[in-house]
Image (tube, rainbow, N blue to C red):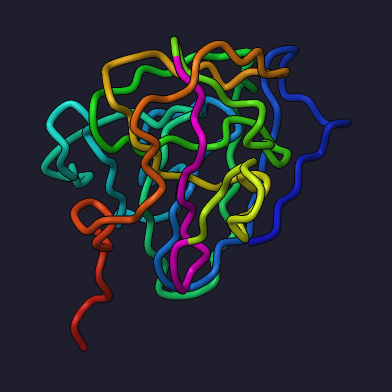
Amino acid sequence: MSTTANQASWSTPNTHPFAVNMPAGTSLVGLPATPTGHDPAETLTTPRLVRWNSSTQSYERLGPTTFDLAPGIGYWVMYTKPTTVSFTGVPVSVPMTVSMHSGWNLLANPVATDLSWGNLSASGSILHGGWIWDGTGYRLVSDLAGLDALPAVPAWHGFWVFANEDCDSPLAFPLHPEWPLPGLRLERPAGPFACALRPAEP
């Protein structure tokens, strides 16, 4: 996945053009801006789009369900061939906050640069690890030593994280640790990790 952002070209004082080259197949993505358009299929150049509802712990497909795209939230997308996604959007202001529910949450890097795991925290707790999809399997992202983990969530990537309770997760720069997350969960169980999108039958 390769990305571009032409910082010298602004449509309005608050908007910015973004582009990313998506590979064929299934990707777990996040957006570095709030799109100015309101059609998710048009913005991501595919109707094969799924989000995770953390309050019900279940998937919602675009079509049966309608929703807007937002930075900080992860989405499954599928492309039948390499595709360039480009849109105009409003970049986020950091720190920003997204709500999490008890259980698995599908969040995303909300900026156009890599997001160090040490810069994420949650109300009353520290997020010790999450999971990104690299196109072939899951990779752990964590700032804990000795885990053979990636240190940051790449730009344009979504990630899974487990919350022990409902809370807000500031995607903040820098991190100000307060309390450890009780009951550290770094294992990858089944459930939402089953891929939500499948290739069309020939």
Q: Which residue lies at the image location 48% right of the left edge and 48% below the top edge?
A: 29
In the rendered image, the vertical position of residue 81 relative to residue 58, given as above or below:
below
Quarter of the image containing the C terminus?
bottom left
Q: Which residue lies at the image location 45% right of the left edge and 62% below the top edge?
A: 138
In the rendered image, the vertical position of residue 1 relative to residue 25, given as above or below:
above
In the image, which residues are magenta?
125-138
In this view, the residue in front, 136 or 129, is 129
Tell me if residue 127 is in the magenta stretch: yes
The x and y percentages for residue 185 are: 36, 41
The x and y percentages for residue 86 are: 60, 46
In this view, the residue in front, 149 or 108, is 149
Count of marks placed on residues? 0
Tell me if residue 66 is in the magenta stretch: no
Q: Which residue lies at the image location 41% right of the left edge and 47% below the top edge?
A: 186
The x and y percentages for residue 25 are: 42, 72
In this view, the residue in front, 105 or 14, is 105
Quarter of the image containing the N terminus?
bottom right
